[in-house]
Amino acid sequence: MERLIYVSTAIPSLAGGDVFDIIQKSSLRNPDRGITGFLCVVGGLFFQYIEGDTSALDKLLGDLAHDPRHHSITILGRWAADKRAFPAWKMKRIHLSQPITQSADFIAQLRTLGIPEDAVRKVEQYLAVRQD
Ligand SMILES: Cc1cc2nc3c(=O)[nH]c(=O)nc-3n(C[C@H](O)[C@H](O)[C@H](O)COP(=O)(O)O)c2cc1C
């Protein structure tokens, strides 16, 4: 069992309906794949946290790499895990209360959700470098 978090860049023409479609299809497929996690779309970026067996994560990463709805996938962190942080989330869409420019609020919200601290730190580091 592993967990990982990545960031990618959504294509400019991405519409709300595309995200709905991704969430809907993922929620149907992920139980069979043994994958749980969340997806957050903010400021033209996807942040996705996924957990499952190594082979399931590798397979999904392979699919994601070929998905034309985003590009520049950067894995921020990948860790071995004893258990799932979000066993009930087939692929939960996280809505932000603040825009990404308020990165401290974004980070606080991630913590509130109960995302493992090492993953929160990676997002924090990514946003700090990006805003410099
Ligand atoms: C940001 C993003 C997140 C995605 N997350 C998942 C996911 O959690 N599970 C999943 O099965 N597909 C997910 N997809 C879709 C896959 O990239 C891919 O389209 C799908 O797994 C395979 O689809 P196909 O069998 O129709 O080719 C995601 C796509 C994007 C752009």
Image (tube, helix red, strand yellow):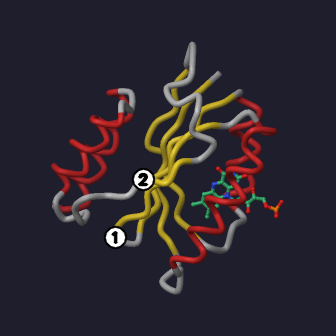
Measuring from the top left, give residue 104's x and y in whole percent.
16, 49
Q: Quadrant of the N terminus?
A: top right
Residue 94 numbered tag: 2
Residue found 26% across the figure and 44% down from its top: 109
* Residue depth check, mark 1 versus mark 2: number of the one nearer the observer: 2
Residue found 42% across the figure and 53% down from its top: 94
Residue type at tag 2 = Ile
Label 1: state its secondary structure. loop
Residue 43 numbered tag: 1
Residue found 53% across the figure and 81% down from its top: 15
Rendered view: 82 above or below 92: above
Residue type at tag 1 = Gly
Q: Earlier in the sequence, mark 1 or mark 2?
A: 1
Measuring from the top left, give residue 127's x and y in whole percent.
26, 54
Rendered view: 13 above or below 21: below
Rendered view: 117 above or below 81: below
Looking at this rendering, what residue extends furthest in the right direction? 32
Measuring from the top left, give residue 115's x and y in whole percent.
38, 32
Question: Whole-Å distance between the Cαs marked 1 and 2?
Answer: 13 Å
Rendered view: 25 above or below 88: below
The reply to whether the residue tagged 1 has its Cβ within 8 angstroms of ligand 1 is no
